[in-house]
Amino acid sequence: MSIILNQVAVWIDSPVEWDIYDLRNVVLTILQNELSAIGYLKGLAYDVEIRRVLNPLLGVDCVFGIEMPCIAERNKAIVLDNAISTIRKKLTEPLGVYLHLCLTDLKSAMKEPNDTSFFCYRAIESLRQHCVAKFSLNPKNKDAHWEKFREIAKCDRTAIMMIKASADAPRHGDVAAMTADERVKLLTTTWDIVDAYLATA
């Protein structure tokens, strides 16, 4: 690894040919761990962004964009001007703070592969809180919260429990592995639930 003017270069020597997105995520984790330690010691809040992977021998030269491929493909037909106008109206309502929390966590779910499940579940929890406030539900009756939320989001308990089960380890400070396919399922299921809730709430 070398760092020149805040640009980090990492060389990986591996007998295995990696999927470039998996490789990016592994290198991102290694770098974030190192910079978190430095940040802790020096009080510096570093961010890492991996922009490119090169392998001249294999003919690989990929510049990473900002898109999450499974969500970008899923949402490619969305007309942004119309959709953003609708969302802005909801965000500026008195309970819009819960929607802001949800959308911020969804952004983090895309950017943080190790914590995708944590952010997906917390995004849904923010929508549940929105539901509680909007419908003046008893704050102590979580079963009623979830029942009303599922009714509005038109989802079954299984979908939410899948996201929760995936999030349990990172929510409690533990480590959990996730395959690329599991991450795609987690993200797309979360987006389905959020879309359905926002369309009705």
Image (cartoon, rainbow, N blue to C red):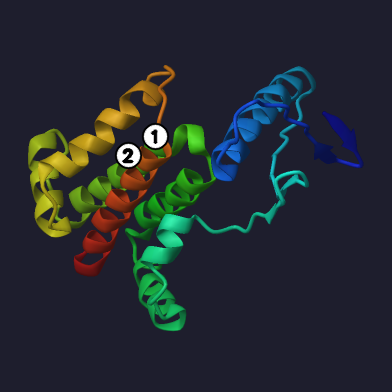
Quarter of the picture holding the N terminus? top right
Question: In this rendering, does residue 11 appear at all?
Answer: yes
Q: Relative to residue 175, is residue 105 depicted above or below?
A: below
Please tell me in which quadrant of the rendered image residue 34 appears. top right
Question: Which SS class for mark 2?
Answer: helix
Tell me which amino acid carries mark 1: Phe
Crowding at mark 2 (Cα within 10 Å: few <14, some 14-19, many 20+): many
Crowding at mark 1 (Cα within 10 Å: few <14, some 14-19, many 20+): many
Q: Residue at x 15, y 50 (%)?
A: 149
Mark 2–mark 1 CB contact (< 8 Å): yes
Question: Which SS class for mark 1?
Answer: helix
Q: CA distance from mark 2 to mark 1?
A: 5 Å
Residue behind mark 2 = 121
Q: Relative to residue 23, is residue 78 depicted above or below?
A: below
Q: Relative to residue 37, is residue 124 depicted above or below?
A: below
Q: Residue at x 36, y 60 (%)?
A: 96
Q: Position of residue 77 (x, y in %)?
A: 38, 77
Q: Residue at x 17, y 57 (%)?
A: 153
Please tell me in which quadrant of the rendered image residue 78 appears. bottom left
Front-most of residues 28 and 88: 28
Q: Relative to residue 85, is residue 112 depicted above or below?
A: above
Tell me which amino acid carries mark 2: Tyr
Residue behind mark 1 = 118
Quarter of the picture holding the C terminus? bottom left
Q: Position of residue 192 (x, y in %)?
A: 26, 57
Q: Position of residue 160 (x, y in %)?
A: 20, 41
